[in-house]
Image (tube, rainbow, N blue to C red):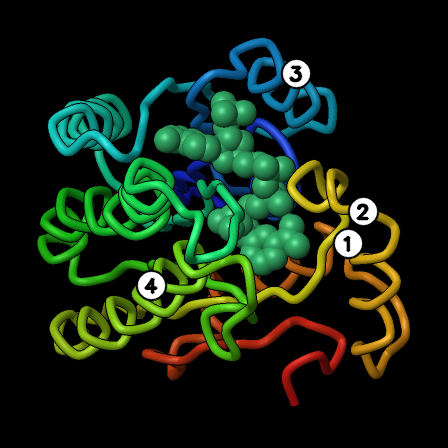
Amino acid sequence: MLDGKIAVVTGASRGIGRAIALELASRGAFVVVNYNGSKDRAEEVKKEIEAAGGKAEVYQCNVSDFEKCQAFIQDVIKTYGRLDILVNNAGITRDGLLMKMSEADFDSVIETNLKGTFNTIRFASRQMLKQRSGRIINMSSVVGIAGNAGQANYASSKAGVIGLTKAVARELASRGITVNAIAPGFIETEMTEVLSDAVKEASVAQIPLGRFGKPEDIAKTAAFLASDDAGYITGQVIQVDGGMAI
Ligand code: NAP
């Protein structure tokens, strides 16, 4: 159980982040539901958590902004007195073939997915070091392991998240803080909804378990990594992909 734990989930207004927020709250954590633009949807997640008997609060923060992340994380720590679980889930795609990819599309994906993950860890880790405990869970992707045509920016960001996870895991291990990544395969959310039927058919053909994943598949893994049961796991990348990248 996660009773009494304070958890921050970035990008929790929809998709995988929403599912993680609901799962952590159902196990007793107080969940900070972060969003960037989708205020109403973040408020809905908070209401869903409360309707199920859990506790949550909504915080706006663009994770790609270093100073805003400092204010956000410090505000959470000041308000709730501690920070036990940090889930870096916020992420975007700006797909396109390399030859046509703009500098802005490369930069924005790196800034949100990779730098955003660094930004929150940078400020959360200070508190976790003081507590001598903490759980950091970063969202990578199967694409960060295997690459994908049309996603040079996204694959770079998600491979970067794996390097960041491993480096920080080594730095923080001696103080009882674990740092792990989850590498989802193809999960049914708004991020993948926009893909063409042809891309979806080609993707499912590459999944040994023969189906796309659901946000809840990732949420259960995140909740395990956040729990006491996962206390001896750090620096790992857990693939939750139906076997896509075996
Ligand atoms: P999604 O449905 O598009 O939701 C993305 C979430 O990230 C939203 O809550 C969004 O908040 C938030 N976000 C985006 N930019 C942000 C920023 N600058 N600051 C704070 N929040 C921001 O995506 P998803 O499919 O749930 O994906 C969640 C994570 O899993 C991402 O890191 C993604 O790369 C990764 N992933 C997804 C899949 C998949 O198949 N779906 C596979 C592998 C990895 P707003 O609504 O407020 O903008």
Identified at 42% across, 56% down, the residue is 99
Please give left or right for residue 98 compared with residue 197 in the image. Answer: left
For disc 2, the marked residue is 196
Disc 4 element: helix
For disc 1, the marked residue is 214
User: Closer to us: mark 3 or mark 1?
Assistant: 1
Q: Is residue 18 visible?
A: no
Where, by quadrant of the figure, is residue 152 drawn? Answer: bottom left
Q: CA distance from mark 4 to mark 1?
A: 22 Å
For disc 3, the marked residue is 44
Task: Identify the mark nearer the N-term, 3 or 2.
Answer: 3
Disc 3 element: helix
Q: Amino acid at mark 2?
A: Ser
Tag 3 and tag 2, C-beta contact below 8 Å:
no
> Would you place residue 146 above or below residue 186 in this image?
below
User: Closer to us: mark 3 or mark 2?
Assistant: 2
Identified at 37% across, 69% down, the residue is 159
Instruction: Indicate the position of residue 10 as horizontal and vertical percent values.
Output: 42, 37
Within-10-Å neighbours for mark 1: few <14, some 14–19, many 20+? some
Q: CA distance from mark 2 to mark 1?
A: 18 Å
Q: CA distance from mark 3 to mark 2?
A: 29 Å
Tag 2 and tag 4, C-beta contact below 8 Å:
no
Where, by quadrant of the figure, is residue 174 drawn? Answer: bottom left
Q: CA distance from mark 4 to mark 3?
A: 29 Å
Instruction: Indicate the position of residue 107 as horizontal and vertical percent values.
Output: 28, 42
Name the one closer to the observer, 1 or 213: 213
Residue 161's tag is 4
Tag 4 and tag 3, C-beta contact below 8 Å:
no
